[in-house]
Amino acid sequence: MKRLTAVSAAAFLLVICVSSAVADIKLPAPKTEGGMGLFEALKKRASAPGGDFPSGDLSDEELSNVLWAATGLNRGQKGWTVPMDRGLPPYVNVYAARRDGVFLYDWGANTLREITKKDIRPDMGLQSFVAGVPCSLIFVADGEALAEFSDEILRTQFADVAAGAMTQNAYLACAAMGLGARYIHSIKENEIRSALGLPDEDRVICIFMLGK
Ligand SMILES: Cc1cc2nc3c(=O)[nH]c(=O)nc-3n(C[C@H](O)[C@H](O)[C@H](O)COP(=O)(O)O)c2cc1C
């Protein structure tokens, strides 16, 4: 009986460990050929209305395409879809908040690295419609990477320029795939910071809503 109890306890612990194990998600390779032409995508680029935002989930392939457009490698192991000062690795990180948790996009491995299993979407935006969005990307200035620049103004400007280029690329990818997108500045920064466990030197720039 004692032995059975010990075995049951071990099995219980195993279940707890497995269910709390970090679950990274290897994304399908992004589509890098074909699709809508750039000028047609430029003609279609628009923000979907916040109050009537598309409520369907993106597939991992669609998310992979948007993330690649925002900050993917496009020339071997050095060279990204967005310009970075001196071709440095991206100093703005992109996180994806979905029903199954929050993930950091690892552009080198095209993988979503799990940060938390918590669904933080209901507590990210100051506008109520943000809570119901299938997926929101979070753009965060990476303080450690930006330490490269000695001047605080440069650190802020360069991160904001990068986030602008990234979100515009994401808008265009969404236009080309018929996905809904919207840039959001009105965010609950403190709630996002603490959910992501960001160090003091990181800065949340914006979120970018996605749906279909
Ligand atoms: C810097 C910036 C901040 C924005 N912040 C918000 C926001 O907090 N909430 C919101 O609903 N839309 C926000 N938007 C989306 C704009 O309202 C939207 O882009 C604008 O209405 C123009 O529409 P269009 O993107 O379809 O051209 C923001 C856009 C930008 C560029």
Image (cartoon, rainbow, N blue to C red):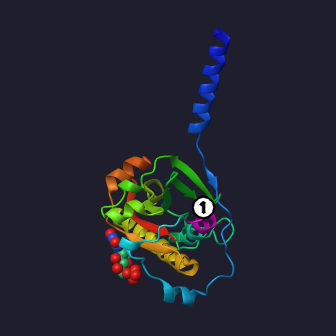
The percent coordinates of residue 143 (x first, y second) are 43, 55
Q: Residue at x 39, y 73 (%)?
A: 52
The percent coordinates of residue 156 (x first, y second) are 37, 65
Report the label total.
1
Q: Residue at x 62, y 15 (%)?
A: 5
- Element marked by disc 1: loop
Residue highlighted by disc 1:
107
Residue found farthest to the top: 2
Residue kind at label 1, given as amino acid type: Trp
Mark 1 is surrounded, within 10 Å at the Cα level, by few (under 14), some (14 to 19) or many (20 or more) other residues, namely: many
- Quarter of the rendered image showing ligand 1: bottom left
Q: Is residue 200 visible?
A: no
Instruction: Give the side of residue 1 with respect to residue 148, left or right.
Output: right
Instruction: Give the side of residue 208 with respect to residue 127, left or right.
Output: right
Q: Quadrant of the N terminus?
A: top right
Q: Give the camera-side residue of 62 and 72.
A: 62
Is residue 62 rendered magenta in the image?
A: yes
Residue 209, by quadrant, is: bottom left
Q: Give the camera-side residue of 16 and 202.
A: 16
The percent coordinates of residue 65 (x first, y second) are 60, 70
The percent coordinates of residue 93 (x first, y second) are 49, 60
Dominant SS type (magenta): helix
Q: Give the camera-side residue of 100 and 116.
A: 100
Give the residues in magenta. Answer: 58-64
Q: Is residue 182 above or below residue 138?
A: below
Q: Residue at x 69, y 65 (%)?
A: 29
